[in-house]
Image (cartoon, coloured by chain):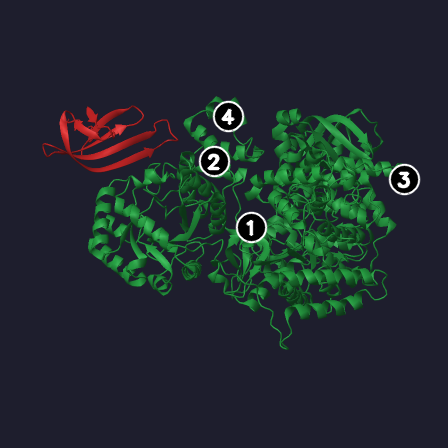
Amino acid sequence: MTYTELHAHSCYSFLDGASQPIEVAERAAELGYDAFAVTDHDSLCGSMEFARAARDAGLRPITGCELTLTDGSHLTLLAEDERGYRNLCRLVTLAHADDRRAPAATLEQVAAHAEGLHCLSGCARDGHVARLVGEGRLREAENAARALRAMFGRERFSIELQRPYWRGDARRNRLLAELAERLRVELVATGDPHAHTIARTYLQDALVAIRMNTTLDACERHRRGNHESVLRSPAETAARFPAWAVRGAELVAERCRFDLTRDLGYRFPDFVSETGESAAAALHRICFAELERRYAGLSHIHEARARLEQELELIAFHGLAGFFLLHRDILEMAREVAVRVRGASAARSLLPPGRGRGSSVGSIVCYLIGLSHVDPVETRLFLGRFLSPELASVPDIDLDFPRDVREGLILEVQRRYGDDHAALVAAFPTYKVRGAIRDLGKALALPQGEIERMARMSDGFDHASGDAARTDPRLDSPRWRAFRFLMDEIAGLPRHISQHSGGMVISSAPLVELVPVLPAAMEGRRICQWDKDSCADAGFLKIDLLGLGMLSAVEECVDLIARTAAEPVDLSRVGFDDPEVFAEIQAADTVGVFQIESRAQMQSLVRTKPEDLDDLTVQVALVRPGPIVGDAVNPYIKRRQELRRNPDYEVPYDHPLLREVLADTLGVVVFQDQVLEVAMALAGFTTGEAESLRRAMSRKRSRSALEGHWLRFRDGAVANGVPEETAKLVFDKVVGFSEFGFPKSHAAAFGILAYQSAWLHRHYPAEFLCSLLNAQPMGFYPPATLLRDGERRGVTMLPPDVNESMAGCTVEPGDGVRIGLGYVKGVGKSAEDIVAERDRGGLFADPGDLVRRAPVGRDSLAQLVRAGALDRFDANRRRLLWEIRLHRAPERGQLALPLDAAPTPRLAGMSEWDRMVSDHEAMHLTTGPHPMALLRPSLPASIRTSLDLRTDRHGRTVTVAGMMIARQRPHTAKGIVFLLVEDEHGMTNIIVPPAIYERDRIVVRAEPLVQVTGRLEKREGTINVIAERVEALARPGHPVIGPARTETDDAELRRLRAAAPVANSFARGRR
Amino acid sequence: MKRTYVRRVGVPQEVEVWTDDRGLPARVGGRPVAHLRDEWRVEEGWWTRRPLRRRYFDLVLEDGRNTVVFLDRQQRRWYAQRA
């Protein structure tokens, strides 16, 4: 007997389903199902992914969901046809309208959207009808069932029968069967699987505990009590039910013919012209007018015209003119928003409101309608990936905006197109190792301290728990064994829905009929239930509006320059050939510069020595996982050095056919589009085939498709006379490259921003530093390090001051940067209140005046004292802390009563060390001396400074000490850990080999103040210490921290450790 | 003085059960099973030292008595519990 599953959960029921849709689809096909429905709780998040995977596996997908009603009961709803699907989307949208965390729909809403849907009466425990039956409320159950039959009609309402092997199944199912008979509706068997394998049913138990925020022991009532919720074969499931209920499921399945992969019915937003002009004609008119304007007098205008004709033809061929015009509209909107948020007169109004990135930058149409700022003809950008005759889906256009413009624009797009037509794309953050350790540890009631330690020490799912458990017999208990087992199962499961970094989808038909739309966590925003892959599968028009911290910083910097410097800067007129800027780039003096500031970039810069914007474009793309895994970095650097030494050097190519496409990058694949070009040049791929290869490489869902591409690649290459070994070599490099690279156009856009930020860094260090500090969090370095870099460039750092500081950081005459009050931890919004009160009532006369006038809590005031913002009144912060506690802020409507307080006791003065630690405690930075400068006299003379290393000889053993700035363990580096350690003179690169890391792991991972002994390695301008030992900085040998304070030195170091700047630590990053 | 003490009630008693070829109870303690009223399964505490894996049956015996028996799937032994 055949059986179709009409009720199943995937991980998109969020913590009530333990398998990915693709796993469910593949397992179901394997078990012999012909059709299958995934019905997640109030969610269609996995519906497109499931439908696609099911089609690929030869399974007919049925789309549905398990809807929660306001009384907490459930209904199983399945889309019979298109109308049903639209109603389903609307219902799920309505259910989330009031509270996206606790979705619930009313029966009236269900009744109003019943058309086209098939309703099953609900699951065994919480089903709208079964629950009442289980509670013995038979009359109410019958009434509820009759009401549903009235809503959906006898044909489209069935009584759902489940067999979870709970006590009471027999009675409940007997009563439900009788009810179905009385109501003359179908009785339908459903299996309600929550996991595709037995292993995952254990995970399902743990997920319930996580969802209830409790332990497995404490949530027995909410768990399923056994492991019968595993996906079984049709025959096995059918055997648990009466034959007519199995036949009922078949009949319902036959009615549900809606196929999400085919019947979605999405259309692009229409282009509406008042004059009746077609979209294609309008685009043609706009582009040619702009072309004549922009290319007037340029030598490549003919080439540009030809290129434009070609692109417009392709656009017309795909019917995409409206698509481009829509982007133009959005950019116009962005211009309006920019004027509003920037203020019309500001210097930053000269800047474009946003910049294109990604493959769109290769298009001349995008250039002409203002989407990109790179002339693709002049920079020889490849169009292929963006637009080709075989285009499989809509092209991607990514736009970068300063954060404030982006915030405004998202709301504006939402407003202009309407809540029902526009929404943000969803993202489903998956379990990361630390979260998994914490959640599973809690579910299993493992000791919290152990779990926390393990979470901090973990290096990823592979090493999460195994190492520790092997060496520690205590960890070999059933709970720890269960923990290790579950850790393997949970990897990669989504935890919740969140919003994508900036993707928006826009539709002319109501979007809420295509995919459910929910209110986002941020006020005024709405997100749809599909992620970017599902949106792409649906063919949705997606625009990426991305916020870029560096653009915000550059904008503010330009504004600051206009305020302080004699002449405002127009970045669009700054040439890309400033030798001073390139000198700094070549010396890797790039702390704070966009994209080329990281440790790895710096190490590369001194070897590649970029000389122009083209070099920077390669540089930006080079230090990425793609080129690193694709084995491109070292060959590129070597060849570049060789070329510098010998201009006649012949660059080697894997095959002569690759000469043309890889000439710019010296024979290696650096850019993503080169993957396409290589496949076309070597194996004769068409653009569409190459694009499909790129997608296969980049999407997690279709990695198995790579094999087919290899065969095609090999045959194509052999036909071109390429030996199979060479083809294999090139193919492996290309696949190694995978998705982790930039397209050239993207790199070109980022290269420009890298140059512009380097230019500002070189010529306006104070303004640049100030704007970087105000755009935090961003970039690679903590603010404390940016500040040291500024000081080396002659910027005077000024401490926060209640009478001088604004809320943000500000530039003061004489290249000074004043730390803003908002930089003090725990002050937050109060900073603006203090400034407002100062503007209103004049400078604060003394601490008492501040306490009385400023509407600020006592804890914030204490933080300001600790940060030194009241140092102007008294250099002894201890005494100030005492004093501000004596002054009592008046209650509302009450006059302050001046009291003669008891005299302040004698409190020890503040040493330089005290002030530095206090600064760090309040701000994670100090404007005074570097901690290492204060510690230096007490350190053994044998410890070298970063300055000493420059003159020390290669190969000698050295010991260095400092604060940890960055820790990295790239998965491309075979277990090697890279550290950046900062002392009062600068930073030192430390390389920790795997064996040393294993031994000194706790120090490497967690210690903010370290001392490293190792071999000094100097090569091609880079200086590294190959660590042999990494230790916590030891207790200083001499009493220098403060007079007679030796006994507390350890305690003092501990204070500093606790307050040290937040390092860029492993994958967590600082962003 | 009278001593008070705690006594566990309803402790499962081991019982002899014959099963049919589908693994369902046919005789309990020698008495034939007349009717199988319900069957349910429990898998609990798999993360502890005392995991529970049981298959329960609610039965009516031929003499009209009602009984609940379970198969402990760890020990492969049958127990009777008060219905």
Query: From the viewer's perspective, is the residue at label 4 or at label 2 nearer?
Result: 2
Estimate the x, y position of residue A749 in percent, counting from the top left: 73, 53
Q: Where is residue A892 in the image (x, y as percent from the top left)?
A: 51, 64
Mark with earlier residue (4, 3): 4
Which chain is rendered red in the image? B
- Contact? badges 3 and 2 (CB < 8 Å): no
Q: Is residue A348 left or right of residue A68?
A: right
Q: Residue A951 carries which label?
A: none
| Image location of residue A705, percent across then percent down | 57, 41
Q: Kindly indicate whether the residues beneath marks 1 and 2 are on one polypeptide chain.
A: yes
Q: What residue type is labelled 3?
A: Pro
Task: Give the residue number, with chain letter if any, for mark 3.
Answer: A647
Residue type pointed to by label 2: Glu
Pointer 3 or 1: first along the chain: 1
Residue at 66% x, 55% y is: A389
Between the C-alphas of marks 3 and 2, the distance is: 55 Å
Chain A shade: green
- Cα–Cα gap, marks 4 and 2: 18 Å
Q: What element carries label 3?
A: loop
Q: Which comes sooner in the sequence, label 1 or label 4?
A: 4
Which mark identifies residue A469? Answer: 4
A66 and A599: which is toward the camera = A66
Residue identified by numbered label 1 = A533
- Element type where label 4 sits in the image: helix
Instruction: From the viewer's perspective, tell me whether residue A63 is left or right of residue A373.
Output: left
